[in-house]
């Protein structure tokens, strides 16, 4: 399959690329900063330079991959404005590009319990933007899956997670979130599902199968 990864130089995405390629997929990485292009090429990812915050009509740039994985995000050091222009509006622009180009599969990385305000004012706004992006994706005709990971860490991945519609907040390594995303590419039965994922005791494939049964 041909997979487009938005936010392709982010930490989750950089864990995701080698997994996808090991499974025989071709990967295009959507990035804002052209300085990151050579780094992606070096690991076998074809870069696509596209600033989601400034571009409006992106369907012609996105093309027609078999699936899109949205991992883009403004990051913890950014202000409220970028939470809107990237975390919400960027996701929505790619939803519209997918609809226009006949791309059916869309996997979104969101935030756990995005509808429950917490933290400081900027973080609350970030959650609101994630929740609105998720709602737009759920309302779309796409074959969507929304993944809401717990607190992200840089710990080594274990390949063991817990996935369900509603979990208590807990940690999860970014590497394991990438493993979940890679598995979802090959699990069309997860279309139309939204679930939380945290570190746990089940292999990724088994944890996702349990989330499907729960739904």
Image (spheres, helix red, strand yellow):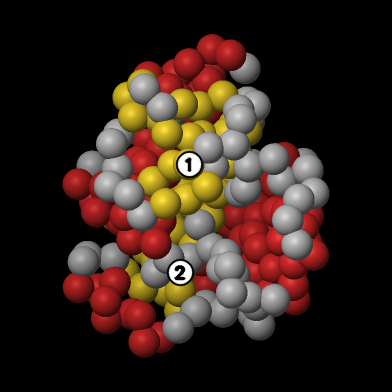
Image quarter for residue 127? bottom right
Between 166 and 186, the one lying in front of the other is: 166
Q: Residue at x 62, y 17 (%)?
A: 215
Q: Position of residue 57 (x, y in %)?
A: 67, 74
**For residue 30, which numbered disc appears in the image?**
2
In the image shown, does 41 or 195 lie closer to the viewer? Answer: 195
Percent from the top left, x then y, of residue 65?
44, 54
Q: Residue at x 43, y 65 (%)?
A: 10
Residue occupying image coordinates x 33% and y 80% = 37
Report the mark closest to the observer, 1 or 2.
1
Q: Is 142 left, or right, of 128 in this rendering?
A: left
- Report the disc number at residue 133: none
For numbered disc 2, what is the local secondary structure?
strand
Q: With 44 as the anchor, is 8 left or right in this view? A: right
Say which of 131 and 60 sits in front: 131
Callout 1 secondary element: strand
> Which residue is labeled 1 in the image?
171
| Residue 167 higher or lower than 45, as above or below | above
- The correct choice, above or below, for 207 with respect to 178 in the image is above
């Amino acid at each position: 399959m041909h997979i487009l990864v938005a936010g392709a130089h982010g930490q989750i995405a950089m864990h995701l690329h080698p997994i996808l390629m090991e499974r025989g997929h071709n990967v295009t990485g959507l990035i804002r900063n052209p300085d990151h292009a050579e780094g992606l090429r070096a690991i076998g990812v074809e870069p696509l330079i596209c600033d989601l915050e400034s571009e409006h009509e992106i369907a012609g740039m996105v093309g027609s991959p078999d699936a899109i994985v949205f991992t883009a995000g403004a990051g913890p050091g950014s202000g409220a404005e970028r939470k809107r222009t990237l975390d919400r509006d960027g996701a929505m622009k790619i939803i519209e590009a997918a609809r226009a180009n006949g791309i059916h599969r869309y996997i979104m990385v969101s935030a756990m319990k995005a509808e429950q305000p917490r933290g400081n004012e900027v973080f609350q706004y970030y959650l609101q933007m994630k929740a609105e992006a998720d709602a737009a994706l759920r309302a779309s005709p796409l074959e969507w899956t929304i993944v809401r990971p717990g607190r992200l860490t840089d710990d080594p991945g274990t390949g063991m997670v817990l996935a369900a519609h509603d979990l208590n907040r807990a940690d999860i390594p970014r590497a394991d979130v990438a493993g979940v995303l890679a598995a979802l590419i090959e699990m069309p039965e997860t279309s139309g599902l939204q679930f939380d994922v945290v570190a746990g005791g089940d292999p990724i494939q088994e944890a996702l199968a349990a989330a499907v049964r729960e739904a």
